[in-house]
Image (cartoon, rainbow, N blue to C red):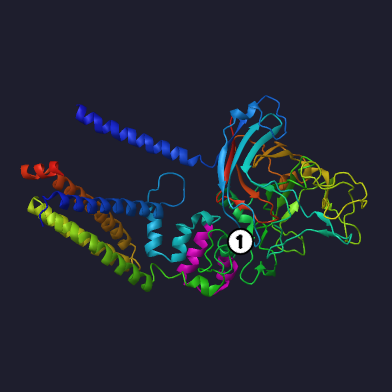
Amino acid sequence: MNIQIKPTLTLIVIGASLVSLNAVATSENELTSYSTNQAIVVDGIAESQWQQAKPLLITVDKMPYIANPYPGITQTQVSIRSLYDDQFVYFYMEWQDPTHSLYRYPWIKQADDSWKQLKNKDQTDHENTYYEDKAAIFWDINARGFSKKGCDIACHMADEAGMINGIKQTSAGRKYTRSEGQTIDMWHWKSVRTGPTKQFDDQFVDSTKDPASNRNWGRKGDDKLSGGYKDNINVDKTGPAYGNAMFDQQTHYAITELIPFTDNFKVDDAVPGIIVEAFTGSRGDISAVGVWQDGKWHLEFKRLLKTDGSNAATQDVQFSDLTQPYHFGIAIFDNAQINHIYHEGVLVLKFAK
Amino acid sequence: MNLSNCATKLAISGYLVSVLLATFAAAALICLQFSGPSAGLPIPKLEHLIAHYHQSQLVASLKGSMYPYVADDDDIVIIENWINAGAADNDVFSQQVMPILEYDCQSCHSPNSTKTGAAPKLPLSNYADVTAFTTAGYSWHRLAKSAHIHLFGIALVILPLTLLVAQLKLHAKVKYSLIALAWSALWLDIVSWWLSKYSVIFVYSIIVAGTIELTLVSLMCFICLYSLWFCANKQDDNQTRSC
């Protein structure tokens, strides 16, 4: 009898193991958001309640193009956790980045008392040296193919003639969806431009395929009432327009108060190259605090489960049915304007009861 | 050759174990290649095998290794129908096929692409580029290349293996069957590659022949190893202990 039972048991064990392996494989791209009734303070620090949220670990190691120069990282691992309550969904994201990059187009005083803005563009006229660290999350709203391919469906690279959609481009690529009415919610955290205002730049991608309609093609900002960022440059474009304090990596890497520029600086002193003000309206829907420490970014952020702007349905993913999966993708920008590291395929957010 | 010699046994065992590992690796490769990208166990799918051997390289890729990059299955159907209708440079190509390739393929399949995983030497930028991959099954060039490599390579594996089996104390019918089947399966497999261009039936014979090949090679390795180390006479045992 034993002789008959043993093979049967063995088969059952092997079968169960294979089934469990299969189950593990299907959940490797899944992020679970856990319900919490504790208050979450968005401060970039993982308080105890985050320990209950299992992280999704994603390696980002793909790049859209080889930039020259590009001294940034070419791969890192992103850890992301999620919690939710009655009103908000919260995320805590971490990734290794050995450089704390906030030196975005700074103005430098020259020996002849003139000012020069540091830039070192790559072959596509995009910056990878004097820029900022960023992170982006794409959420599917209704874009065809996103639930299978992820962000890649919106990525369109220039062909051998430098053309995208038949239009000559210097840029390596552009973003747009396939057809009118298809949109993607784009949460774009920018350490210099939105870091000081403790927000993401809440944007979206639609099907605009022509720079004549929109300079950034399908990539657009959500509706805003006020706020935003703009270059800190005077009317003559010869120096900064605002700022009377030197650039400081910890506290003064963007102009947040409009104090007129007074040139009391020494040679080689630096002044921030960007003016920032908090967004109001849909574009400022996402609150965030990013902390760089010991070679790692810690980014904590939250958004209302359901937003209510006039164009919320087309500009924002709505977490209105917590039984449904929500498809998304992540990209990390290491001091780069458009070059980023990403993962293939799609990630899925599910809400646990 | 004296198979009871300990050093000879070790040498032959090394060869047999290597062949076994190579066979498992080949099986794993087939599973991974034809299972598709869906999460879970890599079990080969008949649809992918048919696409690979019987349909165009473009459709086979879209259903196989490139499937994760295709936005929607309906897009594959559009391309498949266009190829089945003759792959003409017509409105269907410019208005339906090309937009799909632009959205799903060209960011990598472009001569200047430096995207991670790009295939700049396999562009899909225009009609000429695309029709290089619309012939059913393997091209004659690819068939000839694959066939001679596989025949030479696998023959070099099967010859020593079947010679070893010929030396074993097995029932004559078993011995002849193993040897004859091993060679026949190889020939059937390769011939079916050629014929599968014309009929899907030969995709099934590829599956049967391939399965027989892998099974027989593994089986012969196990039988040889077992016979070498566990069916020796007393004199052999003494020699084995001494080494």
Specify whether residue B181 is in view. Answer: no
Callout 1: chain: A
Q: Quadrant of the C terminus of chain B?
A: top left
| Identity, as a three-letter code, of the amino acid under mark 1 | Ile
Q: Quadrant of the N terminus of chain B?
A: bottom left
Q: Reply yes or no: does residue A255 show up in magenta.
A: no
Q: Position of residue A293 (x, y in %)?
A: 67, 39
Specify whether residue A73 is in view. Answer: yes
Q: Is residue A35 left or right of residue A26?
A: right
Residue A312 sits in which quadrant?
Answer: top right
Q: Position of residue B196 (x, y in %)?
A: 33, 65
Residue span colored magenta: B74-98
Please name the predominant secondary structure of the magenta segment in the image: helix
Q: Is residue B136 above or below residue B72?
A: below
In percent of the image, x 16 and y 60: which residue is there? B180
Residue with the mark numbered 1: A66
Which SS class for mark 1?
A: loop
Along the viewing direction, whichever of A131 and B109 lies nearer the viewer: A131
Q: Is residue A204 left or right of residue B205?
A: right
Residue B186 sits in which quadrant?
Answer: bottom left
Residue A158 sits in which quadrant?
Answer: bottom right
Classed neighbour count for the residue bearing mark 1: other residues with Cα under 10 Å, few (<14), some (14–19), many (≥20)? some
Along the viewing direction, whichever of A146 and B223 lies nearer the viewer: B223
Q: Reply yes or no: does residue B94 show up in magenta.
A: yes
Along the viewing direction, whichever of B177 and B224 lies nearer the viewer: B224
In percent of the image, x 73 and y 45: which residue is there? A191
